[in-house]
Amino acid sequence: MKTTFILATIATLAGGLISTAESPGARSRNLPASLAAEPDLGTFMKLVKAAGLQGTLQRSGPYTVLAPTDDAFRMLPEGTLDELMKPSNKDRLTDLIAYHIVPGNFPSAKIDLEERTTLQGSRLVLNREAGVIWIGRAEVLRPDLESANGTIHVINMVLEPDQQ
């Protein structure tokens, strides 16, 4: 009886893990829908829309999106987001968000040590070191959130392109 209960519990847990990892519709959603479904990426999604890049991310791609968490945006100096949201700073906002988008699909299994050009035009170093994936100085907290037209890696900081 006890063994049956344990086996039933394991089967239930395994089924729950499988259904979460392979939730129906996760791969059928495009990148904006996948971003919007993540509760800790609300600020990033708001900025994607404000930058006018939502349409780009709805296209076929594929794209790899390096999405900072809401906590990462809270670490920016006070007033930074308000400044970026001003109409006079739309180009700066677009550059910042486009720097978090890499054309091509780069799931974590394909990341070693490489440079990739972002949608903004600057280059980023992607690196795997001791089992941790780094994008520039940002650590990937949750890799491989899959969507129909790319992959999202959730990162712990906002990346800023080099100022020319």
Image (tube, rainbow, N blue to C red):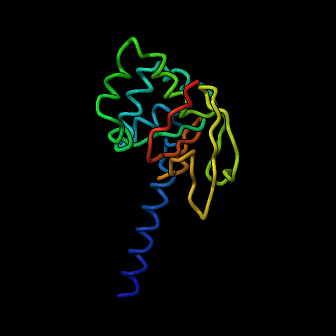
Q: Nearer the viewer, residue 109 or 114?
A: 114
Picture coordinates of residue 28 (x, y %)? 54, 37
The total number of labels drawn is 0
Picture coordinates of residue 161 (x, y %)? 54, 31
Quarter of the rendering containing residue 99 = top right
Q: Point out the image quarter for the N terminus.
A: bottom left
Picture coordinates of residue 122 (x, y %)? 63, 30
Is 79 on the left-hand or right-hand side of 141? left
Residue at position x 47%, y 53% in the image: 141
Residue at position x 36%, y 35% in the image: 42
Spot the residue most to the left. 78
Q: Nearer the viewer, residue 137 or 15?
A: 137
Residue at position x 32%, y 40% in the image: 74
Above or below residue 105? Residue 97 is: above
Quarter of the rendering containing residue 104 = top right
Above or below residue 138? Residue 58 is: above
Q: Point out the image quarter for the C terminus.
A: top right
Residue at position x 69%, y 53% in the image: 112
Above or below residue 58? Residue 19 is: below
Spot the residue most to the front. 164
